[in-house]
């Protein structure tokens, strides 16, 4: 061994010898001692009292008279306290109060383990914010948020109904376990309303808070077709990001139903729900008594550019949504059941979309039709400069496989590029000419077996737009000035004529109307510059009014797709026809009809002259017949202290008229008034109403009203529905009435908003 290594080895042996062990142990012991001191400091108690007596030998402290003990964030008040440091127990008597954070326990006597924060209070009362109040002969504190009640009661009404008066409701139990912000689990419990008890039940679990597991209060009702109805929901709070509600429904005249509603949140950028109903319907008009509906929504943002959206609506038959009174009005009157899934990727100038789509017709006046895109891929480019030139290029490209009951399945590719040349003529006027070419190819022809076909279209447009404005200074403390804006617009549109009867017809891509048309629009807007309290200004649109119409330069009798004609509405100005001249063409699914030279003159009004008043209206005026072919108008008036009212009227002319045997939209004749009302006539009372009225038949189609009375701790309501439904009453000669009673216990500590009753209108 080299000599120079001997000193190094000697030093290593010396360091490894037992002589150094005590020093290491001493250091470790010192660390543990320091930890023990920190623990003692953490659990230290400070006592204040009129008289304090200490017994050092027994480590016992006795305090009398206005005793106050501070323990971290806990405070104990009592008349007399005995603290045993050996057993780490505090025994308190006389006006005992334990304050633990925001929670509080009051009683006659307490035995409390101050290190574990557990104990038992006798003849006690407890309070947990915001509104939970409980009491019992014994209240055992079994943890930071767990309490066990012996011969106790529970309520959330004391926050607005203080002692010494009674409360509207409370739960009495022989024994119960209360988990803070979770649930109350009680054995041999009874429900008391204003001092009147219900029969006791062996077991009860009542959720506390908005998302707590437990049985919800049942709902009962009756209706003309369903008879007596009983609904019992159970809510399962799976975790913080998902929950499930299971509801069993019994209808005396129709049978049973099971419903499941699952809600979830997957991180901050993804959420959705799934709702499924399975109904055993003894009065079903379909071949099967088992009827099903499935509704699902999913919305997910993978990144700012990539998103996924799903909207699923499945019905086992076309009348199921119209059969049951709890179906929302929007679903009862829907014309389609549409299911779609979108996956969209966006870039700065481009976008890519994958679509799965299935649409089923629910209108009983038409055949049961279904259109599916499985799948469709679309690519689109926003306007962008072409090679640094003033020309802009935009376009779209799509490919789809389509299925329709009336048409053979077919693949379709559609390419539509377009060039634009924006040109500023004057500081207040611009002109934008554009040209485009559209190529649409199919793998099959219409009713001709194998072999594909295609369509080529040329499109040219030129649009001239201008903008004028004038300011009007206003000597007002609220309005700085008014701005009147006038925006005229004139355009020419041309699409070459081409035969399209050989093309399969699935949607609006498959028939493009020939165009040789001039369109004008004149828009007037009145803007108010409002002064804010901080000195800034805010722009408010007081009034917007526009007129638009088109002129067909070469009207002819042309052949149109029936799908295209059936989609025309009075406010459409891109095409106008005389539907009374409509005759079937040689090809099934096509009709010949005479074009009109002038489209309807469409007037569009939007106004909000006052803070709580808004109105709108769209009118389609037939200038050739001097009549109104369609109207869509509405008004909303709100008064913060008393509620709000909304009225909407829609009208489409149809049927026979004095000038002609058949109206222009005889298959789509519509006249209806829809009203919504929220009324709060007195404190705690709210009336929510939704109604539909048909002026043609002078018939009320639906009266849907919910009356609620709510305090800070409960809400009771009555839901009344009167309706006529062609699904079970084609002649509209009868109606159905249903009444549902509901009761909710509230734990939030504040009365619910009056709009809460409207959720029963939409169920």
Image (cartoon, rainbow, N blue to C red):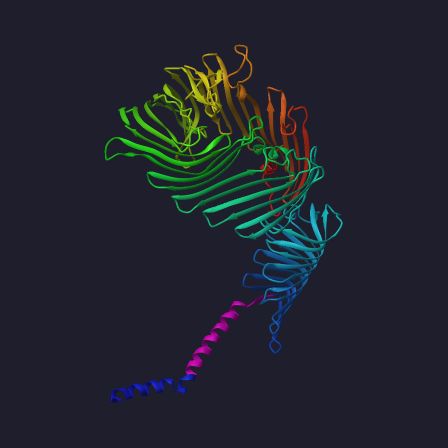
State the residue at coordinates (55%, 44%). 274
- Please, which residue is most extreme toward the left here? 388
Q: Is residue 210 visible?
A: no
Dominant SS type (magenta): helix
> Magenta segment: does it hold 343?
no
- Please, which residue is most extreme toward the top here? 659
Is 544 in front, or is 321? 321
- Name the quadrant of the C terminus: top right
Numbered range of the magenta stretch: 22-48
Residue 68: give x, y in percent of width and height.
Answer: 60, 63
> Magenta segment: does it hold 46?
yes
Identify the image quadrant of residue 346. top left
Is 168 in front, or is 735? 735
Identify the image quadrant of residue 593. top left
Q: Is residue 376 left or right of residue 65?
A: left
Tell me if residue 563 comes above or below residue 103 in the rendering.
above
Identify the image quadrant of residue 186. bottom right
Residue 132: give x, y in percent of width and height.
Answer: 63, 51
């Amino acid at each position: 061994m080299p000599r120079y290594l001997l000193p190094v080895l000697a030093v290593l042996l010396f360091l490894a010898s037992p002589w150094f062990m005590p020093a290491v142990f001493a250091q470790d012991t010192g660390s543990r001692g320091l930890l023990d001191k920190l623990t003692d400091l953490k659990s230290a108690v400070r006592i204040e009292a009129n008289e304090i007596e200490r017994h050092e030998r027994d480590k016992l402290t006795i305090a009398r008279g206005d005793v106050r003990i501070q323990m971290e964030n806990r405070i104990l008040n009592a008349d007399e306290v005995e603290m045993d440091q050996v057993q780490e127990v505090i025994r308190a008597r006389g006006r005992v109060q334990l304050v633990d954070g925001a929670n509080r326990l009051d009683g006659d006597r307490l035995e409390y383990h101050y290190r574990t924060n557990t104990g038992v209070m006798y003849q006690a009362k407890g309070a947990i914010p915001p509104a939970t109040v409980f009491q019992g002969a014994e209240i055992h504190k079994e943890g930071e948020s767990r309490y066990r009640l012996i011969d106790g009661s529970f309520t959330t009404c004391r926050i607005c109904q203080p002692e010494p008066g009674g409360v509207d409701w409370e739960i009495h139990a022989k024994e119960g376990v209360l988990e803070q912000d979770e649930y109350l689990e009680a054995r041999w419990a009874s429900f008391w309303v204003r001092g009147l008890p219900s029969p006791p039940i062996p077991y009860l679990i009542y959720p506390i808070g908005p998302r707590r597991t437990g049985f919800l209060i049942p709902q009962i009702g009756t209706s003309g077709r369903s008879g007596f109805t009983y609904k019992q929901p159970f809510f399962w709070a799976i975790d913080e990001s998902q929950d499930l509600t299971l509801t069993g429904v019994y209808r005396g005249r129709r049978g049973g139903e099971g419903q499941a509603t699952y809600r979830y949140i997957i991180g901050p950028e993804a959420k959705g729900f799934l709702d499924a109903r399975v109904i055993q319907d003894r009065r079903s008009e379909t071949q099967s008594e088992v009827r099903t509906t499935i509704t699902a929504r999913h919305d997910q943002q993978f990144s700012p550019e990539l998103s996924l959206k799903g909207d699923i609506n499945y019905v086992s038959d076309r009348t199921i949504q119209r059969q049951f009174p709890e179906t929302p009005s929007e679903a009862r009157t829907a014309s389609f059941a549409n299911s779609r899934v979108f996956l969209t990727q966006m870039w700065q100038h481009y976008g890519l979309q994958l679509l799965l789509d299935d649409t089923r017709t629910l209108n009983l006046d038409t055949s049961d039709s279904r259109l599916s895109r499985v799948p469709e891929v679309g690519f689109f480019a926003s306007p962008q400069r072409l090679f640094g030139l003033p020309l802009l290029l935009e376009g779209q490209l799509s490919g789809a496989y389509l299925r329709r009951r009336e048409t053979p399945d077919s693949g379709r590719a559609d390419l539509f590029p377009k060039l634009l040349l924006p040109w500023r003529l004057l500081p207040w006027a611009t002109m934008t000419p554009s040209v485009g070419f559209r190529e649409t190819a199919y793998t099959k022809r219409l009713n001709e077996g194998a072999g594909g076909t295609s369509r080529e279209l040329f499109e040219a447009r030129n649009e001239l737009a201008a903008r004028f404005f004038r300011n009007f200074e206003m000597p007002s403390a609220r309005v700085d000035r008014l701005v009147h804006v006038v925006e005229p617009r004139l355009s020419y549109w041309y699409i070459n004529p081409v035969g399209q009867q050989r093309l399969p017809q699935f949607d609006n891509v498959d028939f493009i109307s020939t165009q040789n048309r001039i369109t004008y629009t004149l828009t007037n807007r009145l803007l108010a510059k409002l002064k804010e309290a901080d000195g800034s200004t805010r722009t408010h649109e007081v009034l917007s009014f526009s007129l638009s119409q088109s002129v067909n330069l070469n009207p002819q009798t042309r052949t149109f797709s029936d799908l295209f004609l059936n989609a025309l509405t009075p406010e459409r100005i891109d095409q106008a026809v005389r539907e009374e001249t409509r005759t079937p063409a040689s090809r099934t699914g096509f009709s010949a009809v005479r074009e009109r030279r002038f489209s309807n003159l469409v007037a569009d009004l939007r106004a909000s002259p006052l803070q709580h008043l808004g109105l709108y209206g769209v009118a389609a005026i037939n200038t050739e017949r001097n009549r109104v072919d369609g109207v869509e108008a509405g008004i909303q008036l709100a008064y913060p202290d008393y509620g709000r009212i909304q009225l909407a009227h829609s009208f489409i002319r149809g049927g026979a008229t004095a000038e002609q045997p058949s109206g222009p939209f005889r298959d789509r004749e519509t006249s209806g008034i829809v009203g919504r009302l929220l009324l709060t006539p007195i404190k705690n009372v709210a009336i929510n109403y939704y109604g539909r009225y048909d002026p043609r038949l002078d018939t009320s189609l639906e009266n849907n009203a919910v009356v609620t009375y709510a305090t800070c701790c409960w809400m009771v309501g009555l839901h009344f529905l009167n309706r006529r439904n062609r699904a079970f009453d084609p002649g509209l000669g009868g109606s159905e009435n249903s009444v549902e009673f509901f009761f909710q216990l509230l734990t939030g500590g504040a009365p619910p908003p009056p709009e809460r009753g409207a959720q029963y209108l939409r169920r």
